[in-house]
Amino acid sequence: MSRYAPVPFPKVKLEGQFWHERLETVLARTVPSQHKKLGEFGILDSLKLPDPPPPLRFPRHANGFTVQVFWDSDVGKWIEAASYALAHRRDEDIEAKIEAAIDDLEKAQAPDGYLNCWYLGREPDKRWTNLRDNHEMYNAGHLLEGAVAYFQVTGRRRFLDIMERYLDHIYANFGTGPNQRRGYDGHEEIELALMKLYYLTGERKHLEFATYLINERGQQPPHYFDIERELREASGDNRQPYVFPNYEYSQSHKPVREQDKVVGHAVRAMYLYTAMADLAAELGDAALKRACEVLWNDVMETKMYVTAGLGPSAHNEGFTHDFDLPNQTAYAETCASVALIFWAQRMLHLDLDGQYADILELAMFNGALSGLSHDGEHYFYANPLESDGTPTRWEWHTCPCCTMNVSRLVASVGGYFLSTADDGLAFHLYGGISSSVPVAGTTVAVRETSDYPWSGDIAIQLDPEQPAEFDVKLRIPAWCKGASVAVNGEAVHLGNAERGYLTIRRTWQRGDQIALTLPMPPQRLYAHPGVIMNAGRVALKRGPLVYCVEEVDNPGGRVQRLRLPRAAELRAERRSDLFDGAVTISANAISIDESNWSNLYRTEPPAQREGVLTAIPYYLWANRGQGSMLVWVPESS
Amino acid sequence: MSRYAPVPFPKVKLEGQFWHERLETVLARTVPSQHKKLGEFGILDSLKLPDPPPPLRFPRHANGFTVQVFWDSDVGKWIEAASYALAHRRDEDIEAKIEAAIDDLEKAQAPDGYLNCWYLGREPDKRWTNLRDNHEMYNAGHLLEGAVAYFQVTGRRRFLDIMERYLDHIYANFGTGPNQRRGYDGHEEIELALMKLYYLTGERKHLEFATYLINERGQQPPHYFDIERELREASGDNRQPYVFPNYEYSQSHKPVREQDKVVGHAVRAMYLYTAMADLAAELGDAALKRACEVLWNDVMETKMYVTAGLGPSAHNEGFTHDFDLPNQTAYAETCASVALIFWAQRMLHLDLDGQYADILELAMFNGALSGLSHDGEHYFYANPLESDGTPTRWEWHTCPCCTMNVSRLVASVGGYFLSTADDGLAFHLYGGISSSVPVAGTTVAVRETSDYPWSGDIAIQLDPEQPAEFDVKLRIPAWCKGASVAVNGEAVHLGNAERGYLTIRRTWQRGDQIALTLPMPPQRLYAHPGVIMNAGRVALKRGPLVYCVEEVDNPGGRVQRLRLPRAAELRAERRSDLFDGAVTISANAISIDESNWSNLYRTEPPAQREGVLTAIPYYLWANRGQGSMLVWVPESS
């Protein structure tokens, strides 16, 4: 099978209601308001060297650093998101703001190419002394992603040149050569950024340094983080770790090819695995591919929330033990689900298997999208699956990583829909899109008309410039039973999907019509009994969307009082009054009576009343004021 | 009603199987092994000034301190526990060990009376600069409790003299006078210790200083912890808080009489409330009593585990929000349940209401006793109500506070059984005891014969030296329905208990026999629906004992697979093979089939099999190897 590659987002126009709305919100509200917040919170000023103004509202951490050590990355990520926005429509004001940040970065850059504003402005003599904690390469990676995106959209090289000078500095100082330090960052990110630069420029030095970083990670003894700690201590710098001193936290406990359990900080893990999958594909490295598959299976079998949220614990912002998926205290950082999308996309193109696209879609519509409010200007960092009404979306965060992760994702979401190979065109996500792609020696105009994810009826028209024989691969989601396909009105009998895709090979002609029907009745999902938090509970899902019950739709007290009888019929309803036309799920249900309790415990079971339960898509929760919320509803018989 | 006061433990001999076994274990194994551990871990050596050897195995905390700042308290608490042990039987070896520690303390004491070994040994110029974090008064309080106990048992004054010199130093430096600092400790403890010293000596200065500490707490602006922080910073000491900078953590967010919600670190809160109740009684302070009652109700209505565990969160070792009582991650520190017993006892003697004794008993048999292993040499610091099999009891802890809290409790448990007033004798706890108490102008020999808590049949013989008329108050636990009483074989019809006690007033004669029957069929308990973690779950209880299901009694996989049908009969069985004769509860139950799962989620509900569930008393869990455990069992219909 020839290798499939994604069709980049600037070539995929979003026309359907769902993604068009999200994209317009991000372009019109999220990206501009994020720049405003970067200004208000001193993040833009932090680039103004040699004397950045003191930051506001940020207490010093016990180790003497603050979240400011990450701020370069936030600027880089905003430039990336803003550049993607520019690809949809140019905007002089946004471009001027990006250029102003690049001005500051250019001025800040040291003569030897070094460019980390925190160290340059505060402890220039300490640079590269603490890769474990202080994110210099991580920041470089995000700046690089911003520079790549800005160049791709505008053709302007200045930021890219700055970053290439910085990379040359890094390459000179780190590596396996004499006089080089065998360092790598505590927070992975630069690896996948380097792969983007390599794909852009074709320069092998970037691939080689990414390979070095992946290969060096976790080598021991001695462990690099101990080497540098000893050097710090010898110089009198005894500051304690930012968070954790353990290697697992940064996935550096063993060489990556030997890693078989997902551990540590969830976002770091996902960025690492993304780069590993990139490299496995680029190098044809079977051991690396195998490690990716083993780690993937570990996530799928024991560590993922039903929303594709990752990392149950706030303690390490990451993974704990198998089946530990508490709902109310779920950390499930937005960034982790966004990064899971990155990893899933790399896995999908390493091995075209629908299981990866299923998770990509699940994370997209649930764990990632839940991080952005309907109005596009409020966020969740943690995405719990249950709420007593306390959590609310915030306007900004002391560590604003998630805000720009979700905006850069939505602004580039078109890039996840289609892939092409020499003789094939694959459809991964569905919705209303149009594109024009090269396949089998011709150019094929693609128009997909669908109200997905609200409806599973998908109409695809293909218009090849010349008739051409090639595969059309249609992803049949694992959640879907009874999918059917017709070409030009005639049913196609292709048997079951193979590895998640139905393949139609024929000579395609201008005007050919594919009708794909993905039935999406509301479903009940049960968790592995190992997930004890969900014992006796059920989750509702329709198509790719996980649902939740929210107090505003279920007035009369906290939704934790609800019980869904197992036999109750689930009714889907399109609601034009709700978020521009969302589909709700409702059912006859039981409501527990919370009145007449004095102390916490009693011998009589709580009384019950009959009622109705109404659920909305999870990603839409917490957009209508404060209130309780529940994904996993106790089931009664 | 005349005021009741507890009969001190040296006057109450434990003869019944249950407490006799626990006491013998603590005397023979716990107290000696704790001294060994204090030695092995460097805690005893930390008293050896001026040059204590460096501690082993204790990494420095980010703020430059370590758990060593608490070590004086651990020595004090061990001396207290060991002294209580000596009250049961003298032991030259133990006495020599106590004396050796007192030698070190005496040598360590500064000429001005100051006595904190951490500061004296490491930062003598910094003493009293950080009451918020560094526990100087807390340590003094625990040393003082040790000194009081040792004096009471042995009559030896040396330790008490040392501590009184230290207190004079403290009184000179802190208070509302000119040239005094208005400080109080971040970790309450000294207040209740001062009350013990006041009760022992009658010296009002101790009562007055305790009153000052209680009254000063939370006064602002300015807040004392800010005053001292500013002084530290002015002297160049910018070390960060040990844990939390917020006032709620140490219950200093407002004056104590205005506090109406239980907040912060659970043990601190309980020690504070204990002292508040002591003072409310001693001073007749109605506002303080009212604050105690409001705080008590807040705990009972929204914040207590069914085991009388307190403080759900490891984050602050304390309280969070109403109804937040997660099971698996419950912190429920042993010390907090022990301290709840102290508070409950003070409340009970402030106002003889069975609700306080009910909670005292609940905490005793469950949340506190669970902290000590059956063998008497292993511990739990946190007492979760659910386990996936990971937690195990440990031999020692870097912060060994809980170990000596449970040993000093058990060694003095006899002190919680009886109270006397001028014309009354009250029975709070039941079991096999004998005592001799002054009531109504005569001395009454009391012998209670019972296999409580395994049985609710209680026989009491009273032998007054002279016939005397007085009240006998028998606590009827709130969990008990259908209690009956006979005197000398004749049923007594007294109606319902009033505020938890049945009162029998008559002229008691030598040989009078009271037969109290407390039926204790196994019960199901349901949690307030606000405790969403327990939605659809049921807890089992029999008498004062909360039960749990443990994997060792329910082989075939994790106990989280079990479902208890609502209608299933609960069967109690005395098991001579189990922990010297524990009573189990068993029932026909359902077992969820964990096999045949591939990924984490699926649309088919898990399959079920019929089986049997066996539960043991919660306090006995984790004594037979590792395995899963569950207090709140999902209930099926």
Image: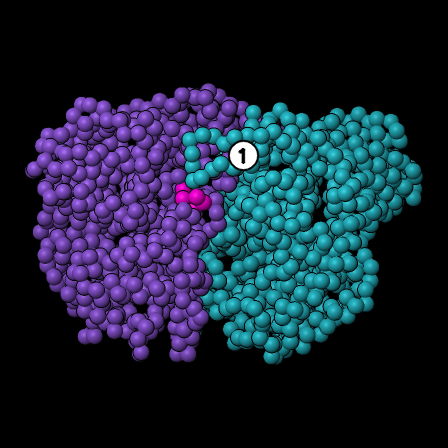
Chain colours: A purple, B cyan
- Horizontal and vertical percent for residue A403? 27, 49
> What residue sits 42% from the left and 65% below the top?
A241
Q: In the picture, which quadrant includes the N terminus of chain A? A: top left
Residue that appears at 28% across and 73% down: A173
Where is residue B629? Give x, y as percent. Answer: 60, 43
Q: Is residue A526 above or below residue A414?
A: above
| Position of residue A515 in the picture relative to residue B255 (left or right) | left
Would residue B96 appear left or right of B291 to someone viewing this image? Answer: right
Chain under numbered label 1? B
Question: Do we see residue A191 in this rendering?
Answer: yes
- Residue A67 vertical placement versus B440 (above, below): below
Q: Nearer the viewer, residue A145 or A25?
A: A145
> Label 1 belongs to which residue?
B593
| Left or right of residue B627: residue A99 | left
State which quadrant residue A361 falls in. top left
Question: Residue B126 placed where, x, y %?
Answer: 51, 73
**Where residue A470 sits in the image (x, y, percent)?**
17, 38
Depth check, front residue: A346 or A432: A346
Residue depicted at 63% across the width and 54% down the height:
B393
Crowdedness near tag 1: few (<14), some (14–19) or many (≥20) residues, C-alpha within 10 Å = some
Q: Main secondary structure of the magenta part?
A: helix
Tell me if residue B238 can be seen. no
Q: Amino acid at mark 1?
A: Asp
Look at the image and say whether residue B396 sits in the magenta stretch: no
Image position of B38 with respect to A395: above or below: below
Q: A166 or A286: which is nearer to us?
A: A286
The total number of labels drawn is 1
Numbered disc 1: secondary structure = loop
Q: Please check the rendered image and state whether residue A302 is part of the magenta-colored stretch, yes or no.
A: yes
User: Closer to the camera, A252 or A366?
Assistant: A252
Q: Which residues are magenta?
A: A299-305
